[in-house]
């Protein structure tokens, strides 16, 4: 074969091998769930495609030189070699991947019920949620695992025995399936679930109670598989029944909160035993479409049972409806467009109510979000959970609204509410915007940053508002917000980051003398030992027991003193320092070392 023909074979072999390698790489992206974050999956496909190109070029050229005459013969042999290698590598990759099994074309969840012995109580409940953990075991080794919910709140008693249900996504075809429970103290041992590489249709029904001979603790379990398009759980709320249809189950951890179960799910609703069909009308569309499945459901705890539901998400935005129970069919009222997940803003003058607020994961019937106060902002409406009424308000003229801050107050007559905004004319200046519900103009109040102390804008809350402003009542007029004529300075307080493996307490706006004063306080309060004392260094070190703490000073921007320790499993010391230092700040003893609120940018 001529050199030109060999080069042609190499080029064709390289190009075709590149396409084959790229195709297998795209499959592997799904098999191994390679993230697209920052283009990772794309780089993976392109990289393997280039490897295929180079390999195909080399194999094609070598085969053409040694095989002798015959262009198509050489090309065929080269492709047979490269495609066989790609097929072998792809097959091994597929076997090693955690690919969820399917039944009837649907992924499945593993529903499990644990049964305690007769007369034995359930383990005591605490604030932490329980999880059903599914392991994949190969060669006697627990290789990987996933968590799903174990619903202690759904526990029931049958024949004197407690039964607790749960579910977890069947996330892989590989290995033996072993289940146990988190926290580990609930069960002494795990159980092997007799499911093959793919579940059988017979396993749609509950198994017998296993193991046939219980262990020392007497706990048994049974299981079944639930396709992703079938009901997994039904919960009652007054005359409503909310059924969850989950495509995926897992857990999520938000900053400062314990792990919670989450899901990708839809919900079917029944009222007094009858299906609820929502007459859905999108914005700017007159056509009404009946919708049976909701994308989010929240219970409204008021005098009359009600649900707030969201349907039909498009580009991250759905439409919310209020369902209020009646003697017959529920009253359905359209609220308007609302982001997914539903973003509720409680309206309250009690900072303690918001301090206990927890973020609710997606995919679960939300029983807590509407249990925090009477009033809420949702989809440009004020919702009164006692009267079950919705009052629209003008959402225009809010280009400088600080969305991440919740409302910080509501008037005593419930006709106005307050939110924080950035000043339109002065960068970094904070103002308070008061929205009226009677259709009157929104008005704004200046914030005197020199007198109305705050370190970060998150400190502008209900307590801060009540310290510096008051509601004035005049007969025949709406309550209006006015600055207090006089007030005692509000104590400074710091901020504490909430990641468990890294905590940092920051205090500011800091003057140069604040760090030495804080270190002196640590020495007196915690018997700390000074390790370094270079005032020009960004961070100095002190030692409390065997723990080294860093005390930093940053004079630029949001000037602050920071107290932190290296990442590790136990950073509770920083949290304790934050608690006690905030108490010391409340005595105003550090005021001489703290300056005015720093300039910020929106």
Image: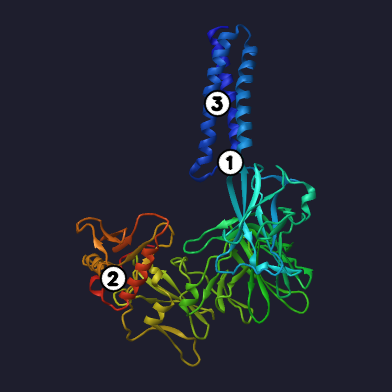
Looking at the image, residue 528 sits to the left or right of residue 246; the answer is: left
Quarter of the picture holding the C terminus: bottom left
Measured as percent of width and height from the top left, residue 406 is found at 48, 71
Looking at the image, residue 458 sits to the left or right of residue 449; the answer is: right
- Disc 1: which residue: 32
Please tell me whether residue 447 is drawn above or below residue 152 in the rendered image: below
Measured as percent of width and height from the top left, residue 342 is found at 58, 65
Q: Residue at x 27, y 64 (%)?
A: 528
Q: Earlier in the sequence, mark 3 or mark 2?
A: 3
SS of the residue under disc 3:
helix
Q: Which residue is drawn at 69% across and 53% down?
A: 110
- Residue 234 visible: yes
- Disc 2: which residue: 525
Q: Earlier in the sequence, mark 2 or mark 1?
A: 1
Q: What is the C-alpha distance between the residues marked 3 and 2?
A: 65 Å
**Considering depth in this image, is 390 or 194 the residue closer to the camera?**
194
């Amino acid at each position: 074969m001529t050199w030109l023909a060999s080069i042609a074979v190499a080029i064709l072999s390289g190009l075709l091998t590149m396409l084959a390698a790229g195709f297998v790489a795209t499959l592997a992206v799904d098999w191994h769930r390679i993230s697209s974050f920052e283009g990772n999956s794309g780089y993976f496909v392109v990289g393997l495609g280039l490897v295929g190109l180079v390999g195909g070029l080399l194999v094609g050229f070598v085969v053409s030189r040694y095989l002798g005459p015959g262009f198509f013969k050489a090309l065929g042999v080269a492709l047979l070699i490269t495609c066989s290698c790609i097929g072998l590598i792809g097959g091994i990759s597929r076997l090693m991947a955690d690919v969820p099994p399917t039944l009837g074309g649907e992924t499945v969840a593993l529903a499990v019920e644990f049964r305690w012995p007769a007369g034995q109580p359930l383990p005591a409940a605490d604030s932490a949620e329980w999880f059903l953990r599914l392991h994949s075991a190969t060669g006697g080794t627990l290789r990987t695992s996933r968590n799903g919910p174990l619903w202690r709140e759904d526990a029931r008693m049958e024949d004197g025995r407690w039964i607790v249900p749960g579910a977890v996504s069947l996330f892989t075809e590989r290995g033996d399936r072993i289940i146990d429970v988190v926290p580990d103290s609930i069960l002494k041992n795990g159980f092997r679930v007799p499911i093959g590489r793919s579940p059988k249709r017979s396993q749609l029904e509950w198994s017998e109670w296993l193991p046939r001979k219980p262990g020392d603790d007497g706990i048994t379990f049974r299981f079944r598989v639930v396709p992703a398009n079938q009901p997994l759980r039904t919960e009652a709320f007054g005359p409503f029944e909310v059924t969850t249809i989950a495509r995926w189950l897992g857990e999520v951890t938000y900053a400062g909160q314990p792990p919670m179960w989450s899901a990708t799910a839809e919900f079917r609703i029944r009222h007094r035993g009858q299906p609820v069909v929502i007459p859905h009308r999108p914005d700017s569309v007159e056509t009404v479409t009946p919708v049976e499945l909701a994308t989010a459901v929240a219970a409204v705890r008021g005098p009359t049972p009600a649900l707030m539901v969201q349907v039909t998400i498009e580009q991250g935005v759905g439409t919310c409806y209020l369902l209020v129970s009646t003697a017959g069919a529920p009253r359905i009222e359209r609220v308007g467009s609302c982001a997914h997940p539903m973003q509720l803003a409680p309206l309250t003058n009690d900072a303690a109510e918001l301090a206990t607020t927890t973020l609710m994961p997606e995919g679960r019937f939300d029983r807590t979000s509407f249990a925090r106060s009477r009033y809420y902002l949702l989809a440009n409406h004020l919702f009164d959970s006692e009267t079950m009424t919705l009052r629209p308000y003008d959402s225009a003229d809010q280009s400088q609204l600080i969305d991440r801050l919740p409302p910080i107050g509501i008037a005593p007559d419930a006709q106005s509410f307050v939110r924080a905004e950035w000043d339109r004319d002065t960068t970094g200046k904070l103002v308070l915007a008061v929205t009226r519900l009677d259709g009157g103009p929104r008005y704004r109040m200046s914030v005197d940053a020199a007198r109305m102390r705050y370190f970060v804008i998150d400190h502008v809350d209900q307590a801060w508002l009540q310290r510096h402003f008051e509601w004035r009542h005049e007969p025949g007029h709406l309550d209006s917000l006015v600055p207090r004529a006089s007030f005692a300075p509000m104590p400074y307080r710091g901020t504490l980051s909430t990641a468990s493996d890294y905590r940092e307490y920051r205090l500011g706006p800091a003057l140069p003398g604040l760090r030495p004063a804080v270190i002196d306080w640590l020495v007196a309060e915690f018997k700390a030992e000074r390790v370094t004392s270079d005032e020009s260094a960004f961070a100095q070190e002190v030692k409390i027991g065997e723990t080294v703490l860093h005390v930093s000073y940053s004079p630029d921007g949001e000037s602050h003193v920071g107290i932190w320790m290296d990442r590790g499993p136990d950073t509770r010391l920083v949290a304790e320092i934050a608690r006690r230092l905030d108490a010391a700040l409340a005595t105003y003893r550090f005021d001489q070392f703290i300056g005015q609120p720093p300039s910020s940018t929106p």
